[in-house]
Image (cartoon, helix red, strand yellow):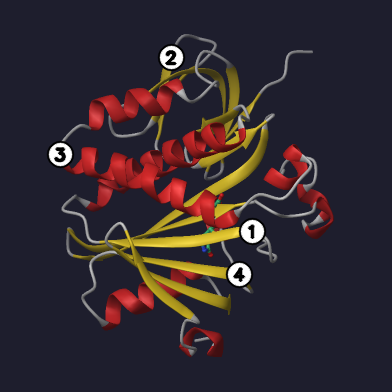
Amino acid sequence: MPRQNHKKPHLRRTFLGYQIYHYGAVSSTNDIAKEIARKNDEKRVIVVAETQTRGRGRAKRRWTSPKGGTWISILLRPQIKPKEVLKLTFITSSAATKTIQQLYDLRAEAKWPNDVLVRGKKICGILAETETKGDKLLFVVIGVGINSNIDMKFLPEELRQTATSLKHELGREVERKTLMKRFVRNFERRYKNLQRGMWAPLLDEWKSLTSFLGKQVKVTSFDEVIIGEAWDVEDDCSLIIRLENGAIKRIINGDLALIKKA
Ligand code: BTN
């Protein structure tokens, strides 16, 4: 266990019923949130850090987390089945997309399953991790990384073509506190609706924030590459691809890329 994780947060306060733990450098805010979840029974916690030394993304990828970014994890104990956790990823993605549109007037969009893009480049990623006992969900940690005040030079070379930051898009820095507060408000509204059983309108909203449906896409799922038209996203968050021969393929996990027309 990295030593930084045992440090005390330098700030603790509450916001919208969440205990907020604010740290300097940590390994990963998701790890801290999990440690908190295992140690005590606090129901709603948000962990914020200035930097992460071992930030991670989906499929065990590294998530570069320099100072200036918005690195947060939300700890929740929802009454849902483990397989429904993707719904939380979707509402988080809608909340982040809406926040970027509302505060900065940028044309942010959601991309299946866990990205937020601006001008086709990734500006935010979401990593939901769970702890379960049998088929019971004990807790979920939703990690959200928003590239806010980050100069492109601090992102690895190989990401500069595919990622962007708010600072880069706007040509100025943003007020991160305002960003976080608006994001948490937007998340909370959707989370409440999810708990009230209003998944259908939440899924409709998420779809309305995307632009890949109806387009030719390439999806890499485990070792398989699937090419076809992004047909729909189903109630369980799976992606439906219509292959060239008309067959339908359902994908629950993978990476999606648009195929650019020649
Ligand atoms: C992805 O796009 O693959 C998901 C990236 C998630 C990054 C965030 S930053 C805060 C939280 N802590 C982590 O280690 N990862 C998530």
On residue 9, the disc is none
**Disc 4 from disc 2: Cα separation:** 47 Å
**Disc 4 from disc 3: Cα separation:** 34 Å
The residue indicated by pointer 4 is: 50
- The location of residue 259, given as percent across then percent down, is 67, 22
The residue indicated by pointer 1 is: 69
Give the mark nearer the N terminus: 2 vs 1. 1
At horizontal 73% and vertical 13% (from top left) the residue drawn is 261
**Looking at numbered disc 4 in the image, what kind of residue is underneath it?**
Glu
**Disc 3 from disc 1: Cα separation:** 32 Å
**Disc 2 from disc 3: Cα separation:** 36 Å
- Does the CB distance between marks 4 and 1 fall below 8 Å? no
Give the mark nearer the N terminus: 2 vs 3. 3
**Looking at numbered disc 2 in the image, what kind of residue is underneath it?**
Ala
Q: Measured along the vertical axis of the image, is residue 72 above or below residue 146?
A: below
- The location of residue 129, given as percent across then percent down, is 39, 60
The residue indicated by pointer 3 is: 196
At horizontal 39% and vertical 71% (from top left) the residue drawn is 33
**Looking at numbered disc 3 in the image, what kind of residue is underneath it?**
Arg
Q: Is mark 2 within 8 Å of ligand 1?
A: no
Give the mark nearer the N terminus: 4 vs 1. 4
- The location of residue 221, given as percent across then percent down, is 52, 40
Mark 4 element type: strand
Q: Residues within 10 Å of mark 3 (few under 14, many from 20)?
A: few
Q: Which image quadrant for residue 94?
A: top left
Q: Is residue 198 left or right of residue 107?
A: left
Q: Residues within 10 Å of mark 4 (few under 14, many from 20)?
A: some
Q: Is mark 3 within 8 Å of ligand 1?
A: no
The residue indicated by pointer 2 is: 247
